[in-house]
Image: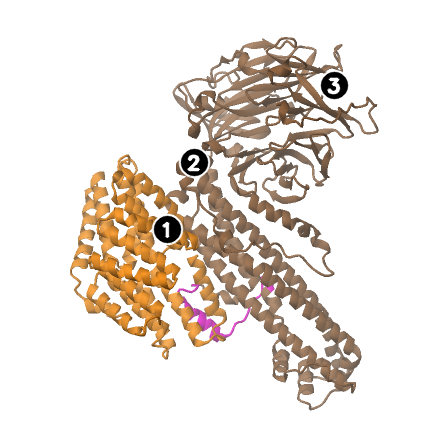
Chain colours: A orange, B brown
Amino acid sequence: SAPMVRMNTLVYATCFADAASSSELSLAYVKLIEQLAVFKGYSAAFCALKLAEEKFPSSTNSQIHLLKMQLLHERALHRGHLRIAQQICDEFGVLSSSVSGVDIELKTEASLRRARTLLAAKQFSQAAAVANSLFTTCYKYNMQVENASVLLLLAEIHRKSDNAVLGLPYALASQSFCKSFNLDLLEASATLTLAELWLALGSNHAKRALSLVYQSLPMILGHGGLELRARSQIVLAKCHLTDPEFSVSEDPCAVLDPLNQAAEDLQVLEYHEMAAEVYYLKAMTYNHLGKEYEREEAAARFKEHVTALENPRDEEDSLVY
Amino acid sequence: NLSLFPPVRPPKKTSPKKPPTKQQAAMAEEQMEEASSSAAASGTPFQLQFDKPIPFQIKLAEWNPEKDLLAMVTDDSKVLLHRFNWQRLWTISPGKCITSICWSPDGKIVALGTEDGFVLLHDVENGKMLRSIKSHDVAIICLNWAEDEPLSRTDKEDLLSYEDRTTRFFPPAPVMPRIGGLNSGDTGLADENEEAIQAFSSASCQRFNILCTGDKDGCICFSIFGIFPIGKININKVPIHVQSSGKRTSYRLQDVSISKQVSLSRNLHQLVLLCSGKLINTDNLSLSNDLSVGVHCLHLDTSIFSNRKNELHQVSQQASSIQDLVEVVRASISMMSKQWSNAMNLFHEKFSALPSLLTAHGMESSSEDEFMSLLFGTHTSPALHQFLVSSLGEAGLKRIAKTIESAGRELRIVVSEHLQPAVEIISFRLAELRGLARWRSRFQNIGLDEKLMDGVTERVGMLVVQVERFSRVAATVLYLFQNFLSWVLKCVKILLSEPTDQVPSTNSELVVIFLKFLLDKDPIKQLLETDQIFEWDIDTAKHVEHLVVFGGFTDTKFLERSLAKQFSELEESLKEAFLMPFTTVSSQIHCQGLLPLYPVTSSDALSSTSTPASIAFYKDKDSQHNASSYSSTDYICFKIPDGSLNLRNFVAVIKDFCNSCSTSNTPSLSGFLLHIPVEYECVDLSLYKDNQVVLLLSGKSSSENAGRSWMVMLQTENLSFSQFSRTFPANYYNLQELEALELQLDTDYGKVRSVPHPLSTPLAVSASRGVACI
């Protein structure tokens, strides 16, 4: 329960601020900033991060530093600054000790991030290779949560490489993993990926995909971050649009409402790729409805995001916060 | 239905025909088995199973839908529960006048409506009261508890199903704290009830059901599971639109009083009710006349319940358990404050002797100064010496220490076992609800508002912080008290020149802190009282402001509030948030149609509520193949009071009223009148399974048949329904158009049995058991 994470961290930060050790307190702050990044966007998170760094100047090498790199990486990925993302990945790799079997968590995180960067760079086979080796490591060290998320990543890689059939078993495996370990949010996102995969298999699966989305929505909306929420809204709209029995003109709200909500969330997140998708879908819908002014507007926004994605002009901006 | 009964039956009890005892009317109760199978039809149609003399007049009776249990309400408002073999399970007397009764669909709860507008829910197992909910201001005339038909579930709904995750992540919810020790007098009830409430909360959320309650003033309330209010509609204010010859006319009913019958169809789609009142044309007020006062049949569209039942189910499931937990928190806070103030009273009572002693000795100093000088060893004033040695004494000091210690222990237990887990589960459940509220397309139209839910989540977060702070403050204060008291004890021993090796060592710094901050103030009490402002040091205030950047609570002043104040704020916002679904759903219940039945003169309008009537919904036979969306037909059966419509001794049966309201092109409304033989009068009637009507006829006292009665079951399909028009408003009451049939007691379109006693209300039939009780 994400709101409870926040609440309990706040309880700690409020009530035990005078008694807690600085590393524990900094962990509480890290958790709060993570929440901010996921739910309120990067600008708020970086603002808070600055304050936290002032507060804990000594612990540069610890959690706060790690958090900074994580946030920078996420933001670079979202903005499409892949070179920066790669650079941060490399830094991650350096952080961990070179002895095998030590700092496993850091290493897995580094390679998970590498796989994601590769995926964003559309180097699917390399990404899959990294993810596969990561899965073996996680399996070896019994890291169940990572197992599930790596499986999900593999499914994602296959989906993005238009290999939906290959992705299905991974998504299903991830889902069942999550179920057995009570990882509700991850399970919901696995279900969402599953829905996306079904949707990729053709319009006759739209109904099934829709029901999967419905299943995962309460969980995602309640506890998922901005990105996951926006993704689920997009999938929801897509399900309706692909469904041959659904007619936009009859129920435009069913498509436009989720799209608007997704656009709002993505604006905060500066996620160009998905925002472009949202505006594309919006423009298409308005086109069907014959609303030309709105269509042009959505198309213009689409173009904005695509250019931002393709010409990452101010890359060094990504390292500044 | 013979097979329903145990194969070996106990020998039939014959009631000895003893004359009525000192009670006014010894009512002979007879149980009838309704022989509906053809095998039994060769013998007597209704077999007498058991009878039993009862020394009360029975006012209401109702069969349990699941088990062979009969609940009865006596004239002096006792509730009896009997098994089929007349074994009595329990008797309760709620102390209020009970005006209606009904069972929950799963047969585990019996709901009672009282004269002052309360709905009482009682456990079937032991008759304990589970809830008492005040939803009306006046007497509740009728109750109807309908459950969602499992058949109407479709695949789509299964996929929209939703799991309550709370049980996976949390231990069972905490219950109300009970007061241990000596002062447990006033909460004996809560103490007994807690297990039952626990079971009730978990069991009641299995399947979606709605309890509707109708009161004397024409209000109908709906509550999910009988506990979560979801809608209220006032018939007096509902506009009724009637299409007549292409013209739309609006009517309104005035001075409505709901009669005994309200019935919600099993797919929760429509509600039919009978009410008496004055019909006025809102477009043309002059048109109303005396005739417009009468009994009307109303059809309300409650399709919101069936269309949105998944959403409502989810929301009410969470919301009702949140409300339970809020009660737990309230009880915890009030108990803690009681415990603590008891302990503090004792402390202050003892220590208040010191200032007066000081003034008696003509000293200017305060008690704090005196203790300080004692601590630093400067001198011991005679007043303090006298106070410590004689008025307080070692025994008194020990008593105070013990009381405070036990109060502190209680406080700790309450916080750790009740308050804290309750608040935590509330916050978890609220977070789930907030997630649902974000799904606007599904939950906005039942009024779950995201903004309000956000506000409530913030408030509960602050409450969590407050609870944590409270437990810290309490721990500190208790330690300081302990330290101070043992120091005083040590001083007393020194003054009496006794050995002090038994006394635990004390920290004199903490004694100073105690004297400075606690001798006159009481931070625990401050936190437990709503109107107190709690002072909090500047560092923390700054810290809290600082946390806002990190996503903390934007209301930085919240630490100034006391715990109790914070809790009442949470309650406020919860109320507001749950009022939204209530008003939203209420506004979506509309009146679909109206059928005036018969006029009543205003003098006997009051008695019309007691006219026998029955409404039931039957599944359409031809729609069986499509299990997901079957339709149902409503049957309304009522006795026309003598003299109304110039008819005497008539019973009317009408069917298909709902369908005729919703689809105006197919006038399917039909019915018939039944003329009861003149020497009998209809005492009570009821609709029974498979479209039958059961009538109780009693011989009129003037005729030679006095003392003989009949019980008649008619198969309505064998009787000819004739259609009748709903032309409006040319002639309000169209019932005379119906074909009138003579009821002959020897014909075989039904089953007839004579009973050798005079009969009176009530008649209770049980469709699932095939039994009737008269």
Disc number placed over residue B758 in the picture, else none: 3
Residue range corresponding to the magenta coloring: B528-554
Instruction: Determine the CA span between mark 2 and mark 1.
Output: 31 Å
User: Which of disc 3 and disc 2 is earlier in sequence?
Assistant: 2
Q: Quadrant of residue B613?
A: top right
Q: Are marks 3 and 1 in contact (CB under 8 Å)?
A: no
Amino acid type of the residue that numbered disc 3 sits on in the rendered structure: Pro
Q: What chain letter is assigned to the residue under label 1?
A: A
Using the rendered view, name the quadrant where residue B63 is placed: top right
In the drawing, does residue B487 fall left or right of residue A55?
right
Q: Residue at x 67, y 13 (%)?
A: B43
- Check the image and name the residue furthest to the bottom: B378
Relative height, residue A44 to residue A18 (above, below):
above
Residue type at mark 2 is: Asn
Task: Give percent across and percent down for residue B110.
Answer: 63, 37
Residue type, mark 1 in image: Gln
**Closer to the camera: disc 2 or disc 1?**
1
- Per the model, the C-alpha gap separating discs 3 and 1 is 69 Å
What is the crowding at mark 1: few (fewer than 14 residues within 10 Å), some, or many (at least 20)?
A: many
Using the image, name the chain to which the residue with label 3 belongs. Answer: B
Judging by the rendered image, the residue that carries numbered circle 1 is A175
Q: In this figure, which residue is indicated by the disc labeled 2?
A: B307
A221 with respect to B76 (left or right)? left
Q: Are marks 3 and 1 on the same chain?
A: no
Residue B192, percent across and down?
A: 68, 50
Total tally of numbered discs in the picture: 3
Q: Is residue B179 visible?
A: yes
